[in-house]
Amino acid sequence: MVLAGFVLAKFILQYILISPEYELQRDEFLHLDQANHVAWGYISVPPVTSWISGIILFLGKSLFWVRFFPALFGALTLVVVWKAIEALKGNMFALVLGATCILFSALLRLNMLYQPNSLDALCWTAFCFILIKYADSENPKWFYIGMAILAVGFLNKYNMVFLVAALFPALLLCRRSIFTDKHFYFSIVLFLLLILPNLLWQYNNNFPVYYHMQQLAKTQLVNVNRWDFLKDQLLFFTGSLFVMAASFYALLFYAPFKKYRFFFYTFCFTLIIFILLKAKSYYAMGLYPVYIAFGAVYLQAILKAGWKRYLQPLAIVIPVLFFIPMYKLMFPNKSPAYIMNHPGAYKKYGLLRWEDGKDHILPQDYADMLGWKELAATIDSVYSLLPADEKTLILCDNYGQAGAINYYTKNKNITANSFNADYVNWFNLDKKYVNLIRVKELQSKDNELKETGPFFHKSYIAGSVTNKFARESGTVVFVFENTKVDINQRIQEEINNAKKYFQSDAAAAEKQ
């Protein structure tokens, strides 16, 4: 009953922490659109997200179901930590402490959006739980279960590779015997078989993951400050830092945890890898939950006798108290106007800093959750007025625009596309297009009428995104009617150029 109460609280919090003023976030639109193009791989992510999106589509793709699955993965992360504490012989105090630390943490922020990150954190936690079970029994069945979880994690987000990269040297330091067990190698074969379809997809598509990583490094990771990365790690579980510290001490010096000592080195090696690669701060968030379990059980041992047992309620209350300021800052539960007029705390904690390394009036995720309905409504109104509307191509600058139009449109005939991200593979050129609706970002709108207009009999600006708080603020909708050229041929040429660019960038990455 206690565990069920924590799970229920988790779901309730995930639904009330977002103000109705905010829409879906740009990445969510891309992931949801993948349900219409199910494959064993994508330029942006591995395939598991598209399978979940297929379920959401089947259920009606309402906001409730979009929010449900990241909340579910967050709730399951809490359940796995609960089970890990039980495996470590934790009592009710340890169980409640661990669950409280997980519930009132930055995982609420991670589980807020429909992205691969929530399942990623769950897979990291579940895999670590399996490592605990193996360390307890050395039963080879845990190899196979662990590798199955690892495969799901890999097929959800390649971030799982970094945990494995850190775990291997940790095992070499503490548990070399694992490398002499034949079942360990058989389980690796199982893992490779499970991920083989995705590896084949990458091979057949010239490994677009290389291109994606190159673009990520050039446009986002280049702005990552390593000191900021380390400071951010302290914010994820601020109210639980004493539990985390207890876990590290216990893993090094507490005799009953000696067999788990490789977890300490795994933690260190993982952070070193992320620091060297200038990773985003949240990439490491899935690393922490299992250490909450170790810390909670150790605190149970040292707070069980005499006056110290009166500190147990205080230990449980501390994460809740630290969550209060987090609630005020870390979630989109304040209006954009309020945040603009009260930027102090947001700026202090770096929440206004975007991936470009600059401060803006809203946190980036919040700005990415505005203006999309307005854009889709503009497209709907323009599309319905065009002659031969079923032969109109809607071409966007980025995947957020295309995905938002496809999600929010009221017209079943509308399908927006882009040369950005996975959309480059999703053009339908069976239609013979005669009209073009061009969605252009504010900074790239200059000369569009002058450059594209001569290829059509009529051209004009139909509208723009007027929400000043939106990241897409100023995005312009151009309309070009009755083409003078073969649009399909031009699109095919651009698709070929985009794919050549992907391949050349991937080849450059491979050489490096």
Image (spheres, helix red, strand yellow):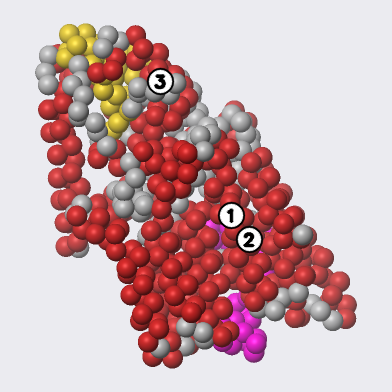
Residue tagged by mark 2? 78
- The amino acid type of the residue labelled 2 equals Leu
Q: Position of residue 146 (x, y in %)?
A: 47, 72
Quick check: 362 left or right of 427?
right
Q: In the rendered structure, which disc, 1 or 3, sits on the residue that comes first in sequence?
A: 1
User: What residue appears at the point 76 percent right and 80 percent down from the top-left corner?
Assistant: 302
Determine the CA span between mark 1 and mark 2: 7 Å
Which is more foreground, mark 3 or mark 2? Answer: 3
User: What residue appears at the point 50 percent right and 65 percent down from the top-left corner?
Assistant: 124
Q: Crowding at label 1, few (<14), some or many (≥20) Cα neighbours within 10 Å?
A: many
Front residue of this view, candidates 35 and 419: 35
Q: In the rendered structure, which disc, 3 or 2, sits on the residue that comes first in sequence?
A: 2
- For residue 239, above or below residue 192: above
Quick check: 137 left or right of 382?
right
Number of marks in the rendered image: 3
Which is more foreground, mark 1 or mark 3? Answer: 3
Q: Which mark is residue 74?
A: 1
Q: Crowding at label 3, few (<14), some or many (≥20) Cα neighbours within 10 Å?
A: some
Residue tagged by mark 3? 411
- The amino acid type of the residue labelled 1 equals Gly
Determine the CA span between mark 1 and mark 3: 34 Å
Q: Position of residue 140 (x, y in %)?
A: 47, 83
Q: Give the residues drawn in magenta, as a range.
A: 232-261
Report the quarter where the C terminus lies: bottom left
- The amino acid type of the residue labelled 3 equals Asn
Q: Position of residue 388 (x, y in %)?
A: 26, 12
**SS at mark 3?**
loop
